[in-house]
Amino acid sequence: MADIQPLLRRPAPQPLASNENGRFDHLVRPDGMVHRTVFTDPAIFEREMTQVFGGTWVFLLHASEIPNTNDFKCITVGRRPVIVTRDANGDIRALMNRCTHRGTTVCLQAQGNASRFQCAYHGWSFSNTGELLTVTFAEGYGPGFDKAAHNLGRFPRIETHGGYVFGSLNPDVEPLPEWLGPARAMMDWSLTAFTTPGARVVRSSSMVFNANWKLQNDNNGDMYHVPFTHRSIAQMTAERHGAGKALDHFRGDKTPMVVQYVGHGHKLIDQRPAIPSPWERARPVPGREAYSQALHEGFGPEQAQHYLNMTGRAGINLILYPNMIISGAGSFNVYEPVAVDKTIVHSYSVVLDDAPMAVNALKSRFLEDFAGFGYRDDNEIFERIQHSLSTIPEMEWVDFSKGLGTDRESVGADGTITGAVSDETGIRGAYQYWVELMERDVHPCVLT
Ligand code: FES
Ligand code: FE
């Protein structure tokens, strides 16, 4: 026994309750360590569905996904099935996809156009504002039956910024602009530089990984992993096309790129200082030369360059807590938590109806390129993390301390914290917000 003592890294672990009296700060330490159960404990996941996905703003959809009166789209908000509709007045509503009779979903179609939804079980029908319109065989209900109390549940709060629609089940949540804070300026930069008045969002693909949703959220604010996890892409690009293309702009922290924590769980990787021209920096994709030539011939060099720069990677990762990342140029991903160890990531692209076809074609090729190849690398890592955190209870902590206690971090006048680009500054900020949300006294509710 004596000779194994020096090999023990720390005392035998004490059982650590995941939820002691509603406190969660013991799971996120000031030294940047986060307890493994934050990723593996089903009870914590359940609480997140109420406190995080029910307690703050959550991205629902882009307004252009339901452009016309009576359009609707079914989504999931912290596992809740939700129908987002555009009613006769053009207002966007978010309705619980749950019949107020016996509870089945009232809409099975992923997306479509309908002014009312009829339940497939006993035939009650509801308007796309949630109002209960018809009760079948109504004579069977006594005088005490309150029809108005049987409207579909509605989100109490919906607000929009730049076409991005957010909803909250917390009626007391702060106004959206306040919650977005400095992230709002980043969204505006992306909207101004990379979209046109005819911008329209289309769904591109969905991927499932068997790991906790926060691993994706963390990773999108992590530049540290890029040269290692995505090494095969970087190497293949360099060998085929030489230096100066995507992913070789990060080779360490001697760079003007930064990571920022911008409050309310939101974080930013700002690669713009290293990407003066998104087009020049982008990896070659099929059709690149032909599309470029067509734009030059059609619009002249200056306008062609403007268009081409709208197609490449824009140089920001803006992660809006808890469920989306805007990765420049308007493309974005939405994380859908399914279980403590299962997540779906939905990818969306922006189509510019008033831009030449070549612009949209190139935007699609670039999205296939990195989301298509790159995300698979990341997903593999998430699943390995989930496995080891779940199966080795003797090692309790996950380390997010990079940058902490160094002179690389600085706090701005607006409260944003800036670090070297490979630091875990943004991730630590997000976990502080997670604790705040998990401990907060919130009462998510629906309106009827
Ligand atoms: Fe919907 Fe009965 S469950 S009408
Ligand atoms: Fe990655």
Image: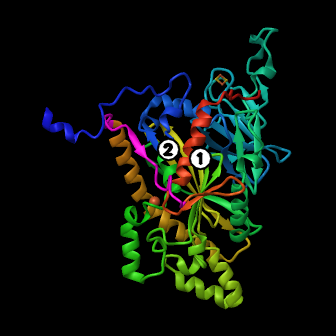
Instruction: Look at mark 1 in the image and give the residue it sits on.
Output: 323
User: Which residue type does callout 2 highlight?
Assistant: Trp
Mark 2 packing: few (<14 Cα in 10 Å), some, or many (20+)? many
Residue 238 magenta-highlighted: no
Instruction: Look at mark 2 in the image and give the residue it sits on.
Output: 213
Magenta span: predominant SS is: loop
User: Looking at the rendering, in which quadrant would you find the C terminus?
Assistant: top right
Task: Residue 219: give x, y in percent of width and height.
Answer: 48, 54
Please give the name of the residue rendered at 44% of the width and 69% of the height, measured from the top-left corner.
Answer: 252
Residue 398 magenta-highlighted: yes
Q: Is residue 25 left or right of residue 134?
A: left
Quadrant housing residue 64: bottom right
Depicted 47 relative to depicted 180: above or below: above
Q: Disc 1 versus disc 2: distance between alpha carbons?
A: 9 Å
Please give the name of the residue rendered at 50% of the width and 26% of the height, measured from the top-left corner.
Answer: 19
User: Looking at the rendering, in which quadrant would you find the N terminus?
Assistant: top left
- Quadrant for ligand 1 reads top right
Please give the name of the residue rendered at 47% of the width and 47% of the height, measured from the top-left corner.
Answer: 215
Please give the name of the residue rendered at 40% of the width and 65% of the height, measured from the top-left corner.
Answer: 230
**In the displayed image of the protein, which residue is found farthest to the right?**
89
Foreground residue among 346 and 420: 420
Task: Residue 162: give x, y in percent of width and height.
Answer: 75, 57
Q: Are marks 1 and 2 in contact (CB under 8 Å)?
A: yes
User: Which residue type does callout 1 highlight?
Assistant: Asn
Quadrant housing residue 434: top right
Depicted 90 relative to depicted 354: above or below: above
